[in-house]
Amino acid sequence: MTHPAAGSLDDPTTSPFDVARAAAAQIAEATGVDRHDVALTLGSGWGKAADRLGQTVAEVPAAEIDGFSASGVPGHSGTLRSILLPNGGHALVIGARTHFYEDKGVRRVVHSVRTAAATGAKVMVLTNGAGGIRRHWTPGTPALITDHINLTAASPLEGATFVDLTDLYSSRLRAVAREVSPELEEGVYVQFRGPHYETPAEVRFAETIGGHIVGMSTALEAIAAREAGMEVLGLSLITNLAAGISDEPLSHAEVIAAGKAAEEPLAALLSSIVGRL
């Protein structure tokens, strides 16, 4: 069955939700799964978790689905994966994140989240690799996101759309995560625009205004997930201490290496959490 095109995300007269619904229909056709219950965006270091969640039903190149494109960041799979969970539900694993710094527009940044909601998912798990501001954190530390500060000067909401973000990173889901790992670190995530790393002065600014984690994703996606009526769980892998906190220079190779080293414990953690959702 061929689904008619819903229009382009780049066309301001086209509803991004129509494109998301069309993408969800294409995912259902490609995977044979009519509904997904939970969705996960797996950032740097978190990709191995998909193998632990359950039985892979289908894996689709993201670029074949309306509104998606191949991942522009090394370390991301570039696929959409449908997984049968042990409880009989289905998870949609998104390995093709569009970052704000790619200049493809906010609609494309949050399209994966809106598509996940259109597939039926009620829970959105957003993960990332990020820099840590707390001095005792070491590379490989996972941290729950309790709140965020959006420094992109952008929003996925269009027009007079007012959405309450009071409990954006669900306290219920964080409690579930703590049942699995009571010792989990936590903090406020600060999204910068990127793609350059933050300066030491910017990190000091982030800390002064209440931030503990700095990165280049997640906040815009979380807002879109809340708009779509989803519960959000946010998890960061601390891949390095942020600029000025450590004297070491920052590099994407360091992020990839830290993620690689932490893959197994992160996979065990995330699969255990999803098993309780």
Image (cartoon, grey):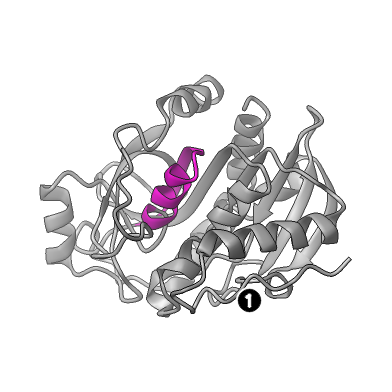
Does residue 139 appear anywhere in the picture? no
Residue 46, horizontal then vertical, whole percent: 58, 52
Q: Amino acid at mark 1?
A: Ala
Can you tell which quarter of the image residue 3 is in?
A: bottom right
Horizontal side of residue 221 vs 152, given as left or right: right
Horizontal side of residue 85 vs 132, given as left or right: right
Residue 165, horizontal then vertical, whole percent: 31, 39
Say which quadrant the C terminus sits in.
top right
Q: Is residue 227 magenta?
A: yes
Q: Which residue is mark 1?
A: 70
Residue positioned 78% across, 36% down in the render: 85
Can you tell which quarter of the image residue 270 is in?
A: top right
Residue positioned 49% across, 45% down in the render: 228
Horizontal side of residue 226 vs 118, given as left or right: left
Does residue 119 appear anywhere in the picture? yes
Q: Which range of residues does the magenta coloring cover?
A: 219-240
